[in-house]
Image (cartoon, grey):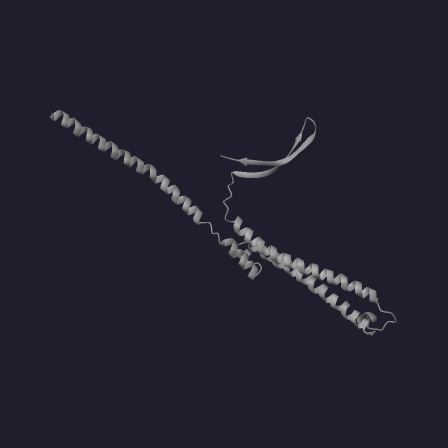
Amino acid sequence: MPNKLFIATLFSLLFCCFVTAQEKNNKKKEIPEAISVDSIIEIKSSYNPLAPAKAAFYSAVLPGLGQAYNKKYWKIPIVYGGLATGIYFYTTNNKEYNRYRDAYKSRLAGLTTDEFYYDTNGELLDTPRVSTDGLERGQEFYRKNKEISLLVTIGIYALNIIDANVDAHLMQFNVDENLSLAPHFRINEMDATSNLGLTLNFKF
């Protein structure tokens, strides 16, 4: 009887040791998983979902400010160059349109004192340099160019906002160098035909 009790006690101790060792092994296995979860959380926390909205808002308030927020300073001169060009052409066409419109109104009033009745030296001419029909065509031409210039300027302003928003999105993507997409061009030596396409490479 004492031998049986001793054997049972020894078996119980061995079982407890086995269970304890197994629990320790399980805890050791859980540590890398916890580290990987923390790493995933840390990686996800680096993504700022409000960054694209901020960049777009800054560019809407002041063109180029969103590009500065994205630290793409080299784009700022391009934004202002495009806006300045659009504004310049709008102003020029608007000025010419007003010239032709004022002269046309003067002709309709029966006056012969508009600027087209004078030459470049300021001398009065018998016939105007631009006819009344020419004034109408000139108004239509410069009015159309003025509207196009305005649309182009608004388009550049909108592109400035879109560029800042998209750039802020792309800056938060992790691009792996092992993944590449490149065009390829091959010539078949058998029949002298060419093949053009895209090649996707992924390195493990």
Residue 135 shown left or right of residue 64 in the figure = right
Q: Position of residue 196 (x, y in %)?
A: 65, 35
Q: Position of residue 46 (x, y in %)?
A: 45, 49
Foreground: 84 or 59?
A: 59
Whether residue 130 is visible here, answered yes or no, is no
Q: Which quadrant would residue 25 be assigned to in this image?
A: top left
Residue 154 shown left or right of residue 32 in the figure = right
Residue 143 shown left or right of residue 133 in the figure = left
Residue 110 shown left or right of residue 176 in the figure = right
The residue most toward the right is 126
Q: Where is residue 77 in the image (x, y as percent from the top left)?
A: 60, 57
Residue drawn 41% across and 46% down?
41
Q: Name the quadrant of the N terminus.
A: top left
The residue most toward the left is 2
Q: Position of residue 67 (x, y in %)?
A: 55, 56
The residue most toward the front is 1
Residue drawn 40% across and 44% down?
39
Foreground: 16 or 73?
A: 16
Relative to 9, is 74 above or below?
A: below
Whether residue 10 is visible here, answered yes or no, is yes
Q: Which quadrant would residue 189 be assigned to in this image?
A: top right
Total tally of numbered discs in the picture = 0
Relative to 111, is 177 above or below?
A: above
Q: Which quadrant would residue 81 be assigned to in this image?
A: bottom right
Residue drawn 52% across and 53% down?
52
Residue drawn 58% across and 53% down?
163
Relative to 187, is 75 above or below?
A: below
Foreground: 151 or 116?
A: 151
